[in-house]
Every structure is written in C-alpha cells, then in structure tokens.
Image (cartoon, helix red, strand yellow):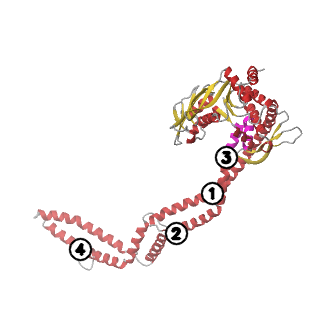
Amino acid sequence: MLRELSIENLAVIEKAEAEFGANFNVFTGETGAGKSILIGGINAILGQRTTKDIVRTGAQRAVITAVFDDVPAAVAKKATEMGFDAGDELILSRTIASDGKSVARVNGRPATAAMLREIGSMLVDVHGQHENRILMSADNQRDILDNYGGITPALEDYRVKFRAFSRTARQLKALQDESRTRALKAEHLTGVIEELEALNIGKGDGDRLEQELERCRSAAKIQGALFGAYTALDAEERPAAIDMLKSALSLLEGVADKEPAAAELAERLDELIPEAEDIAMEISSLMNEDRGGTREEALSDRVSALRHAKRKYNMDSDSLVDYLDECRSELMTLDGMDGEIERLTAQKHELAEEVKSLAAVITEKRRAAAEKLSDEICGQLAFLDMPNVRIVIDVREDKVTINGRDSVEMLISANAGEEPKPINRIASGGELSRIMLAIKSVLADADDIPTLIFDEVDAGISGRAAQKVGIKLAETARKRQVLCITHLAQIAARADVHLLIEKHTENGRTFTNVTELDRDGRRAELARIIDGDGKSESSLAAAENMLSGT
C-alpha cells in the first residue's frame, strides 16, 4: 500500500508530505486548493506523462517520492525481473526539471517511465472523473467482464493461437499473390539455365577455349614450324641434328682413352642425345593433331556463343558458371513454393479450427460471468440508492478478432419497466460514478491491486446517495487501501485518516499544505463542507453526529 507521499515544487505545492493509513483515507479542501495537483503527483509517480508546466514557478525541478510497503509478491517479482532490489518495500521517485526532462528511480536505481507504469499499475488503481469514460468503450466493458470472470488466462492462450493463425494467413496470401510473378520468374530462370547449360563450360574454360581457337587459326604456321623442327632434328634424306650428335659422340669416344676431357664431354653428349630424340617424337605427335577443319569450326561456334553470353550478362566466363548455379538454386526454391502453399493452407485450416474452439470456450465463460457480474453490480447499485437500475451485459457472437469472437456491451435500464439500452447513451454523470464504484467494489475480490484512488467519485450525487457511497467506500477499504478526494461530508466522515489540503498566500506567492486532521479538526472541516463556513452550531453538531455515527 501507499504509506508516504512527498512532494516538492509541484505547481502551488512548495513542499508537502502525507502519511496514509491502511484503510480509508480522504482528502478535502476548498475548490482550487490543490487536490488535483496531489493526484497529478501520484500519477507522475505511476509513470504517467508529465510536462514542465507542473514545476513550481522559479524552481529548477519538482520531486515526487512515494513509499509503498506490504508490497505484493507479484510486484516484488516484477521489480526484481527489471533489475531492482525489491523486498517488502518499494520507493518510487520522479524528478521533473524545468525544461521538461524527467528522471525516474525505483529503490534509488534509475528507471524509465515505462518501468514506473508497469510497476505502478500493479500497485495503484486511480479512478478519476474522466475514468468514467471507461464505461463508454466496448473494449473496456469487455475487459471488465474478462477480469471479473478470470478469463484473461484463457484469452492469452487464445491470442497465441490467433496470432499464429493471422501470421500463417498473411504468409499464405503473400505467396498466393506472388504466384503469377513467381511463374514469370521461373520461366525466365529456366531460359537462362538452358542457355548457360548449352555452353557446357566450367571454371577456366573461357581462356582455354580462346587459346585453343587461336591455335586452330594458326594451324599452317604451327604445322610448318613443327615440320621444320622435326626435320632439323631427325630427317632421313639429309644429315640431321641427332645424327650429327651421334657422330660427334663417336669421335669423342674414340679419343677418350687419350684425353680425359674428351671422355667427360662424351658422357654429357650421351645424355643429350636421348632428350633430343624424345623432343623429336613429341614434335611428330603434335604434327599429327587436327588443328583445322571441323575442329576449328566447332571451337569457333563455342567461343562465339560464350562471347555472346558474356556480353549479354555482363560477366566473365567463370562468373557465368557461378550464375548458372545461382539460377538453378533459385529455381529449386521457386518450385518448392507450391509445396509451401499446400503446407500453409493445411496449417491455416488447422489453426482456424483451434482458434474457433478456443473462442467458443471464451464465449461460454463470458456468458456465464456476464450473468453473475450483472447480478452483483445490480446488488451494489441497490445499496448505492439505485434500486431500480438494472445492468445487463450483452454477449453476442461477432467476427473473430484478437479478443475472441464476442461483442460485449453493457446495457442499462434506469427505471423499472424500461428496456435496457447502451450505457454510453443514457447514463448520467452521477449514475456513471456510482456504476463505476459498484464495478470497482465487485472487482475488488478479482484483483490484487493494494491501493485504490477515487478522485471526486461523489460527482453528481448528494444526500442519501452520498451517504451510501461513503459506506461502500469504507467497506471497500476493509479489503484494501482506499484514497478518496471528496467534497461531501457524508463520505469524509467515514474515513480512517482525514487529510486537509489548504492554500494560502505569503509575500505574493501561493502555497499549499497537506495536514492530517485530529477529531476536532475533522469536525471543523466537516462543518465547513456542510454549510461553506463551518461556524454555525447546527453544522458543527451535524459534523459531530456524522463522526459519532449517529
């Protein structure tokens, strides 16, 4: 619960501190004293949006600090998950600079406003006059029903399946929309693959084919050179180089026994002759190769086709080989899309059945909870001096959405015999306030938020109704901490802790103070609320009777 609140330099509040009791706490004060500013400070602590305008004129910053104790285990766990040291106590603070920048802290460690909002939403539920608009929204009416009926876990399971269904449906539609484009792409890839496969080339073949074609075109010159080299080495009709080498070897061997150097030269020459003979044989083999005719024509056709492909695709021959592999891979992927469409179609159908089944369960739960919630709200409203008001929660099947397949609408019959009509059309401000209080009272057992704050829940009511609202707030405060800003003595008299918000002027500056009242102070304040002055004997007597419960 909220134990302490400290405010510095917030609007007209220079410095104020307040301690709260565990049950029913009320704030009273004249209009404009700063009650709404106090709520604004609490909202800042809860991570709501702030502006530089809330900083007191002349101050560099506003600082709001709240101390919470008896922190629920779920809140402590959430804070720990966020990286904060959390136990039975949490200290939330917010500093707003005069330039609009703000700094948040949780137990002294830096935090973001989003972190404050998440933690704050588990600690405090603030209900102001504008919160009555919650009842105007069908989505909020559905959320109220789901919270009451404990439907949220089932709804989360449903949403997991619904999101999977939606994701699958989007993927399937995208593939189906791309089917024509995919067919054109596959046709293009098939043409490229056929063209490149016809080249029948591998890495390095481009340069090799160019060189081979050049040799074919120089066949006559090559053949003449080979013939001349061969005949010079090993011709029969005239002395050739090999015969002359053999003759020289014979002469050197003839004098080797007389001249040692001649023997050495003979050995070297003997090693040279086999190499010359081997060269002559390889030249003879090269002379027999086909370098013209059909070979040149075939090579010319291949090289011409390769050159055309290189120009067409602006790639060298090795890159064409890589491109062919890429096209084959992409075509295989496209061919597999038909199978993917079949798979996604089956998956979509399966998920649709699961979503339908889960939605049916949620519908059944909502209808059961709607009847029970309607009865409990009507019971609360009867106590709040609205005995003839009938609330009906209409649950109808609608299109399937992330929230199920139901349309949920609260209907109200304000007078006996009238047909229930949408609550957002006919309920008055006072009725909305009491209906919301009735809902909060019913939901008090359905959630574990330790602190409820009501900002002028008494709007539009008076007399007996106000007295009943006070009783109901006090009853609610037995289960959790309640803070209430009120202008009605009937409500303020029921409080366990009564805080007075007063505004005064010093040296041309406005100041607001928050003071906890003792019994005499409470009697004086209740008397002021009753007659606007609080000095008459009758108003003081009435205030005393209220405090005494008589």
Of 490 and 83, nearer the camera is 490
- What secondary structure is marked by label 3? helix
Marks 4, 3: nearer the viewer? 3
x, y (%) of residue 96? 54, 38
Residue farthest left in this picture: 258
Q: CA distance from mark 4 to mark 2?
A: 49 Å
Marks 3, 2: nearer the viewer? 3
Residue 141 in the magenta stretch? The answer is yes
Q: Is residue 496 visible?
A: no
For label 1, the residue is 337
x, y (%) of residue 508? 56, 35
Q: In the image, what residue type sits under mark 3?
A: Arg
Q: In the image, what residue type sits under mark 1?
A: Met
Residue 97 in the magenta stretch? The answer is no
How many residues crowd mark 1 within 10 Å: few (<14), some (14–19), many (20+)?
some
For label 2, the residue is 198
- N-terminal label among 3 and 2: 3
x, y (%) of residue 252? 15, 68
For label 3, the residue is 163
Q: CA distance from mark 1 to mark 2?
A: 27 Å
